[in-house]
């Protein structure tokens, strides 16, 4: 059996810088990954199958539309494997869960079948976040997801991830975005936690305001994080998950406990962010 983690992707910033003629949006984003996430295991089999378990399995499509099965078919059409996916992340939550699962499937199945990974252009057909999810290192992601570049070492970071249990369709958020030609991120420039938060505070998530218009509960979650003294609170991806940054694990864990006590219906997790 080959096992792979599928860490949650967190867009610490997400600038929408344009839209191509084919209507794909151009992005500029600082992407990091959390220690928490889904897990995937693969075993040899004559047929390709997918079983889904875990606390967040409800609502995840088990059929050929699932990105895990699409990734397997891309890598080796007709090849068999038994794939087991343990879902710990909310579905369609702005944490790249499906993309992280597809990336983990590509990594695991390439080992199982002794095959090279497909080219990035082909991987992109699975989704803009799949190439960046092939690595758990902080990266700057630009274009439609094909342009990945290293960033300076990220200081130790702790996050509280909050999802108010609302589903936010990505298409609706982009349609509500009034300006699709926004400035790119500033050049990455930090050397410790304070300078990192200062730099990040000058960046944006251009999808946050339209997402709040679609799902006001996102604004409630952001306000709650700010009340817990998060050094920065922002939405990840197209929502609905929000994050608050903390300098220490103790601070993040205390904030998560307080938020869950106040909002027991929310999905709340404290986690380190993977900085290298």
Image: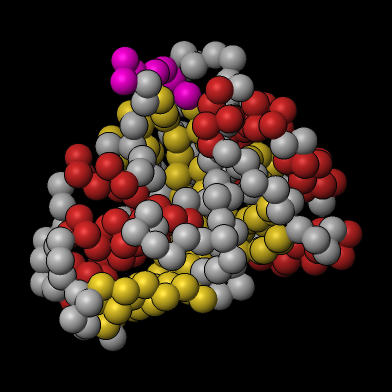
Q: Which segment did they paint magenta?
A: 16-22
Name the residue rendered at 14%, 62% in the picture. 76
Magenta region includes residue 38: no
Magenta region includes residue 19: yes
Q: Nearer the viewer, residue 43 or 187?
A: 43
Q: Position of residue 261 (x, y in %)?
A: 87, 65
Image quadrant assignment for residue 156: bottom right
User: On the picture, is 6 further left or further right than 71?
Assistant: right
Quarter of the image for the C terminus: give it.
Answer: bottom left
Question: In the displayed structure, would residue 249 be above or below residue 228?
Answer: below
Image quadrant assignment for residue 205: top right
Name the residue rendered at 67%, 27% in the picture. 209
Name the residue rendered at 34%, 32% in the picture. 144
Name the residue rendered at 15%, 66% in the picture. 78
| Residue 102 in view, yes or no | no
Q: Nearer the viewer, residue 218 or 246?
A: 218
User: On the picture, is 46 further left or further right than 17?
Assistant: left
Q: Nearer the viewer, residue 18 or 62?
A: 62
Q: Residue furthest left?
A: 115
């Amino acid at each position: 059996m080959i096992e792979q983690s599928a860490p949650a992707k967190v867009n610490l910033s997400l600038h929408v810088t344009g839209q191509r003629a084919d209507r794909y949006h151009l992005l500029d984003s600082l992407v990091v990954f959390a220690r928490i996430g889904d897990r995937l295991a693969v075993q040899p089999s004559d047929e390709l199958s997918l079983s889904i378990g875990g606390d967040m399995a409800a609502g995840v499509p088990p059929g050929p539309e699932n990105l895990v099965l699409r990734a397997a078919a891309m890598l080796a059409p007709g090849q068999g494997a038994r794939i087991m996916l343990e879902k710990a992340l909310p579905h369609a939550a702005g944490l790249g869960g499906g993309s992280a699962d597809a990336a983990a499937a590509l990594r695991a199945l390439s080992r199982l079948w002794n095959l090279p990974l497909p080219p990035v252009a082909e991987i992109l057909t699975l989704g803009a976040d799949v190439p960046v999810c092939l690595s758990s290192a902080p990266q700057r992601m630009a274009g439609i997801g094909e342009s990945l570049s290293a960033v300076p070492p990220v200081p130790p970071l702790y996050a509280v991830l909050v999802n108010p249990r609302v589903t936010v369709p990505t298409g609706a958020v982009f349609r509500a975005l009034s300006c699709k030609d926004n400035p790119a991120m500033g050049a990455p420039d930090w050397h410790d936690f304070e300078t990192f938060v200062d730099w990040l505070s000058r960046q944006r998530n251009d999808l946050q305001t339209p997402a709040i218009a679609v799902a006001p509960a996102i604004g409630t979650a952001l306000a709650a994080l700010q009340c817990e003294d998060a050094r920065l609170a922002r939405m990840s991806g197209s929502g609905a998950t929000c994050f608050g940054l903390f300098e220490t694990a103790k601070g993040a864990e205390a904030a998560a406990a307080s938020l869950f006590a106040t909002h027991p219906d929310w999905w709340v997790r404290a986690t380190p962010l993977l900085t290298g």
